[in-house]
Image (spheres, helix red, strand yellow):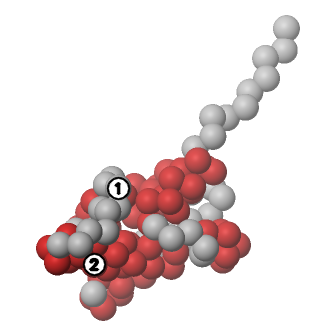
Amino acid sequence: MAANTSLLASTMPNLTSSNYLLWALKMMNFLWASRLIWVLRKCCPEEGEDSSDQTKVNNRDNDNNHALGHILLKIDAHLSNHYQAYKTSKEVWDGLKSQFMKPPTTSIRV
């Protein structure tokens, strides 16, 4: 994972208020190459009593923690402080998308 972190640091811009589209594309590509993209698409498995179910939960938690760490490392400090309390990478991803993908407001004067 250390190689991924150094690759992330060298190739990814930090998310700012003006570069969401570029950042999101690059972060998705990075997560895909790191085999972590699935945590943005699937719901958390339910915790079960069967040991194989618990293994799935543990794997999901591990992948989520890695993806969440990558995302939080590449957003500006004021954004990171806000999203630090989120528990899943999907929650952070959806929150950032909601924050930055608002349709532009235009006014038409007649």
The amino acid sitting under disc 1 is Cys
**In the orientation shown, which residue stands out farthest toward the bottom?**
2
Front-most of residues 88 and 32: 88
Assign a secondary structure to mark 2.
Answer: helix
Front-most of residues 67 and 26: 67
Q: Is residue 104 visible?
A: yes
Front-most of residues 20 and 39: 39
Q: Is residue 86 above or below residue 1?
A: above
Assign a secondary structure to mark 1.
Answer: loop
Instruction: Name the disc covering residue 59, or none.
Output: none
Residue at 61%, 73% in the rendered image: 85
Residue at 63%, 34% in the rendered image: 103
User: Horizontal and vertical percent for residue 101?
Assistant: 58, 44
Sequence-first disc among 1 and 2: 1
Mark 1 sits on what residue? 43
Residue at 63%, 40% in the rendered image: 102
Q: Is residue 108 above or below residue 15?
A: above
Left or right: 34 in relation to 51: right
Q: Quadrant of the C terminus?
A: top right
User: Horizontal and vertical percent for residue 17?
Assistant: 66, 58
Q: Using a 10 Å C-alpha cutoff, classify the residue at mark 2 as few (fewer than 14 neighbours), some (14 to 19) or many (20 or more).
A: some
Q: Is residue 19 above or below residue 5?
A: above
User: Horizontal and vertical percent for residue 95?
Assistant: 57, 55
**In the orientation shown, which residue stands out farthest toward the left?**
52
Instruction: Name the disc covering residue 58, or none.
Output: 2
The amino acid sitting under disc 2 is Asn
Q: Quadrant of the N terminus?
A: bottom left
